[in-house]
Image (cartoon, coloured by chain):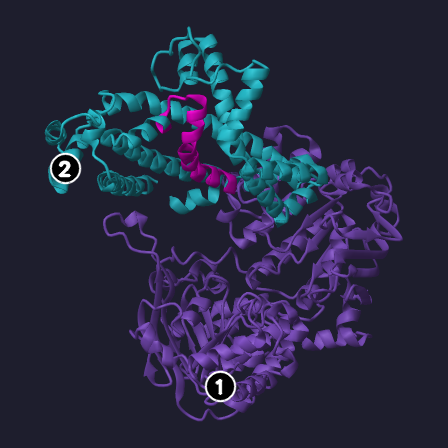
Chain colours: A purple, B cyan
């Protein structure tokens, strides 16, 4: 604490905190305007925004992409590209007047009084420098310490942000860290001179939900220890709910609404805020799928599917790098139904989706689509069958050819499979029909992908998949890259299309709330295996695998009670190259700890077995019956308090 | 790592085999008669035929190839029909000469290109403009012409450069042979005067050879520096409060240099090939002159030997560049181990 006061030149903050209850103001901005040069003159990204942060409080700036939230925050420190024009009527950070500050003055503020962490910790770290050196560099820059001292301070900081074995990790390179550890290292770097203000720009957006929970906990802990103010930039209202004291809602470069977190989330005044809240998929809301009888029969049957990467070296086994990305998966999906496939990054869900439609060839196992076995078919034999199954990818920008017009993108599958008899007029008619099916129209025919919004691009991706009238569409994180309001529209579209066309979806996603909303059944994947599967509402209400419970518990929900007890998983998912014998989940399992570390978990690998009382559900846990009963109260937002399965 | 090098050595052997076949066939396909070249137009047909038998060029091609490979595997590159000097002896002095010239040229071009590219990527427009002019001129100028102009200016007019002939001025003896690179050998032997004389002789040809490459690499460096500057970790460095200079030299440059290093290694081979004309202009006793004279004289052995050694050099350089890349970029290091 002494270090903080020593490094804070303005005398006001520390003594005041002792006498007056009034917290020190750290950041005040009024009339902030930022513009960038565009094709036709300057484009305003931020137009007259005010906000402030006091010591010891977390202020969240929320908004969808293009709202100017990140630009606002970075402009204060001069971290925008040089072409940006930044103006403000009044701007004070930790006692420094920003309106008069030149680049050198801004640099003196950066790192010393204000620490910054960014969205993507991998690209935000220098790839060719050791992590420790990058932190030590910040120490040197800020405190002018000698090398060995800087090193000691960096190790201390790594320890403080919860990186195990910091002495050894000091020498690691960024690519040797997991995503969560990288963000911890970024936080360590930002804390070097114990700044009074921390700007966190989407700090958990690139992270898995269990890791997100850890990082948010860490930010809150450090904020209290160091009595920092935090300016939290995020698009995720769930993150806001559990973290922030006050909220500023932004849209198109302007502040729409501001207030305490409770006011904004529970009593929003502006229509935009209401719409935004309504669009957020709710974890505790029943599936939107209409209960309907499956018209019988399976469209997809997967049995014992395996996908291996790397190879086994028979003569030098220590050099083997065989990884089973998908390790013995069984799945069934009924006609015109939706199966949600969830799991953290690296669990193999994308590989499984690609292996099912034979974009990646499985190493072993059977895939049947519409009764036809795809295993062992040549590429040529598969081609006519591909009209049965299609895929929609995560990034609609990257998965559409930028040089093609919408018409050509949609004509391609029609031509390849010779689906439209007749001339160009008939083909044009079919393309327009497809566009209208996904809520677009004739006016989009001649556009190219960059002339469309993100939501429109994904609609084109869906239309392209629908062109061949498939029975099954694999949706691989198809709504993850979209803003919540657009995401809600696309989800509705998908549901409408399913009702009209009877297509079945394999819906791969990391967002559990979205999965609940759209799915009939859900399968939870961990390290290449399915660990739990069953009807989505039942699984969410009473999870029967400790991993499912932990995932559900980690999801931030739109509730303002800040200290909901959570199951925060330790560590990161282990690498699929290094799976312990026995249960793959054992070293992160909270239930095993609670049950006094039973031996069976470390010796016997649990198979996916149907529950005794409900044949529709399966779980790969030796103690599946104990999961729901062992949950800390309120730790899983969806859990049925009235009583779960015994 | 060991297996990586082992694979590369195997690949090198394969490359050398194909190079030997091509070198062997090309010469024998080309028209003309080596025996006639040796004996001159006045010699009788009988004498020519006799010499052809002695040379072995009357044998069927497969037998010739086997004989030739057998010699090579015993380390015998043959004898020049033209000069009567064993090819191996000639190459052991000529290869270091060419290599030394090439190394200085490439070092010069990297030393020029990196700061020039970095500065051109910076905010001052006039530097970028001047560096672009330099690039256009540098790439558009034929090296031999540049060489002639340099000789005219620095030797004829200003008289500060040594005469454009050989690697050392008259009165200097080559330093004791260790590497064959005179500047290195002179330093090893402590002959400072010889070192500076060798350096002076290297200066103009190295500039001639290195300048166009410097022009090219500076544009690559500019581009890659500008690309790196857009990356997130540059913003992180600024957010730490690092000065612009620190951002540039600690964070941007090491990353931006990667493509320049790869390209310069790839272009080193080109450089050696391009040294032929420059060697002619500066009377440099390198491989280039030797090969061109031998080709014209249908002198098989020197050409074959030079092609083989050229291929070997090229392979080794690429291996070196790959290894160097691993040193600079830790991501590659781990993926290989």
Residue B81: image location, x then y, percent: 21, 25
Q: What stretch is highlighted in magenta?
A: B259-288
Q: In which quarter of the image is residue B14?
A: top left
Q: In which quarter of the image is residue A585?
A: bottom left
Q: Quadrant of the N terminus of chain B?
A: top left
Q: How many labels does the image show?
A: 2
The answer to whether the residue labelled 1 contacts the one labelled 2, judged by CB atoms less than 8 Å apart, is no
**Residue drawn at (31%, 35%), measured in percent from left and top?**
B312
Name the subunit of mark 2.
B
- The residue to which callout 1 is attached is A503
Tell me, yes or no, if residue A282 can be seen here: no
**Residue drawn at (74%, 59%), measured in percent from left and top?**
A38
A386 to A170, vertically: above or below: below
Tell me, yes or no, if residue B205 can be seen here: yes
Residue A111 located left or right of residue A344: right
Mark seen at residue B64: 2
Residue B174: image location, x then y, percent: 38, 12
Magenta segment, prevailing SS (helix, strand or loop): helix
């Amino acid at each position: 604490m002494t270090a903080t006061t020593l490094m804070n030149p303005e005398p006001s903050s520390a003594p005041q905190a002792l006498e007056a209850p009034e917290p020190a103001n750290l950041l005040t901005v009024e009339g902030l305007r930022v513009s960038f040069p565009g094709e036709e003159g300057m484009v305003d990204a931020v137009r007259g925004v005010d906000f402030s942060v006091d010591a010891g409080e977390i202020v969240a700036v929320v908004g969808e992409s293009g709202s100017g939230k990140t630009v606002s925050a970075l402009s204060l420190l001069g971290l925008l590209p040089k072409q940006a024009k930044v103006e403000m009527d009044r701007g004070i950070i930790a006692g420094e007047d920003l309106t008069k500050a030149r680049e050198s003055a801004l640099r003196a503020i950066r790192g010393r009084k204000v620490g910054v962490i960014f969205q993507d910790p991998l690209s935000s770290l220098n790839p060719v420098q050791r992590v420790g050196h990058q932190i030590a560099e910040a120490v040197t820059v800020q405190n002018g310490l000698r090398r060995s001292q800087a090193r000691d301070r960096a190790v201390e900081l790594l320890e403080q942000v919860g990186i195990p074995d910091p002495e050894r990790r000091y020498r690691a390179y960024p690519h040797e860290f997991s995503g969560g550890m990288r963000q911890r290292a970024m936080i360590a770097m930002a804390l070097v001179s114990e700044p009074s203000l921390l700007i966190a720009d989407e700090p958990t957006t690139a992270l898995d939900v269990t890791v997100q929970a850890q990082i948010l906990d860490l930010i809150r802990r450090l904020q209290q220890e160091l009595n920092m103010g935090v300016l939290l930039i995020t698009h995720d209202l769930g993150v806001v709910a559990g973290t922030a004291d006050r909220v500023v809602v932004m849209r198109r470069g302007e502040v729409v609404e501001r207030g305490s977190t409770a006011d904004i989330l529970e009593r929003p005044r502006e229509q935009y805020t209401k719409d935004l809240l309504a669009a957020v998929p709710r974890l505790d809301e029943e599936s939107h799928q209409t209960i309907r009888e499956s018209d019988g029969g399976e469209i997809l049957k997967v049995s014992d599917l395996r996908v291996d990467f790397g190879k086994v070296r028979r003569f030098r086994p220590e050099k083997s790098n065989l990884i089973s990305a998908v390790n013995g998966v069984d799945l069934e999906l009924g006609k015109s139904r939706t199966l949600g496939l969830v799991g953290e990054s690296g669990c193999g869900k994308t590989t499984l989706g690609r292996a099912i439609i034979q974009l990646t060839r499985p190493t072993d196992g059977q895939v049947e689509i519409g009764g036809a076995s795809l295993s062992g078919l040549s590429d040529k034999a598969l081609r006519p069958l591909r009209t049965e199954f299609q895929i929609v990818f995560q990034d609609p920008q990257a998965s559409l050819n930028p040089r093609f017009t919408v018409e050509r993108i949609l004509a391609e599958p029609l031509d390849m499979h010779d689906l439209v008899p007749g001339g160009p007029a008939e083909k044009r008619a079919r393309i327009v029909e497809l566009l209208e099916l996904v809520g677009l129209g004739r006016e989009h025919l001649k556009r190219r992908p960059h002339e469309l919004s993100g939501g429109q691009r994904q609609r084109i991706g869906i239309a392209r998949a629908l062109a061949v009238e498939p029975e099954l569409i694999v949706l691989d994180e198809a709504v993850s890259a979209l803003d919540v309001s657009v995401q809600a529209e696309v989800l509705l579209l998908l549901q409408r299309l399913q009702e009209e066309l009877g297509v079945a979806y394999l819906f791969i996603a990391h967002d559990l709330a979205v999965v609940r909303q759209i799915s009939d059944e859900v399968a939870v994947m961990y390290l290449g295996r399915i660990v739990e599967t069953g009807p989505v509402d039942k699984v969410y209400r009473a999870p029967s695998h400790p991993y499912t419970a932990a995932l559900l518990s980690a999801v931030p929900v739109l509730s303002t009670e800040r200290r909901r007890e959570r199951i925060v998983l330790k560590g990161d998912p282990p690498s699929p190259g290094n799976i312990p014998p026995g249960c793959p989940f054992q070293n992160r399992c909270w239930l095993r700890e609670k049950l006094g570390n039973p031996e069976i978990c470390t010796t016997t690998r649990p198979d996916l077995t149907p529950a005794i009382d409900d044949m529709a559900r399966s779980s790969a846990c030796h103690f599946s019956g104990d999961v729901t009963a062992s949950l800390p109260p309120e730790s899983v937002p969806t859990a049925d308090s009235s009583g779960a399965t015994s | 790592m060991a297996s990586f090098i082992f694979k590369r050595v195997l690949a090198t052997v394969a490359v050398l085999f194909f190079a030997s076949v091509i070198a062997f066939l090309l010469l024998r396909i080309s028209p003309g008669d080596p025996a006639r070249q040796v004996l001159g137009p006045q010699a009788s047909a009988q004498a020519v035929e006799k010499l052809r038998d002695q040379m072995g060029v009357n044998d069927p091609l497969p037998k010739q190839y086997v004989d030739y490979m057998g010699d090579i595997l015993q380390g015998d590159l043959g004898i020049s029909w033209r000069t009567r000097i064993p090819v191996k002896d000639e190459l052991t002095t000529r290869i270091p000469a060419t290599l030394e010239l090439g190394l200085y040229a490439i070092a010069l071009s990297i030393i020029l290109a990196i700061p020039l590219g970095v500065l051109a990527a910076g905010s001052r427009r006039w530097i970028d403009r001047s560096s672009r002019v330099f690039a256009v001129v540098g790439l558009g100028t034929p090296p031999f012409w540049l060489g002639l102009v340099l000789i005219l200016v620095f030797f004829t007019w200003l008289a500060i450069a040594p005469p454009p002939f050989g690697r050392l001025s008259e009165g200097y003896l080559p330093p004791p042979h260790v590497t064959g690179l005179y500047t290195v050998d002179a330093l090893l032997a402590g002959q400072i005067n010889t070192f500076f004389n060798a350096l002076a002789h290297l200066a103009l040809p190295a500039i001639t050879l290195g300048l166009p490459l410097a022009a090219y690499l500076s544009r690559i460096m500019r581009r890659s520096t500008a690309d790196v500057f857009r990356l997130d970790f540059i913003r992180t460095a600024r957010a730490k409060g690092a000065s612009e200079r620190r951002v540039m030299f600690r964070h941007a440059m090491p990353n931006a240099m990667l493509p320049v290093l790869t390209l310069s290694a790839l272009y080193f081979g080109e450089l050696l090939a391009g040294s032929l004309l420059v060697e002619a202009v500066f009377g440099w006793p390198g491989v280039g002159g030797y090969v061109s004279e031998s080709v014209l004289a249908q002198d098989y052995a020197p050409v074959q030997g030079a092609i083989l050694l050229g291929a070997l050099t090229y392979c080794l350089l690429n291996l070196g560049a790959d290894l160097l890349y691993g040193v600079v970029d830790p991501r590659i290091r781990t993926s290989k181990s």
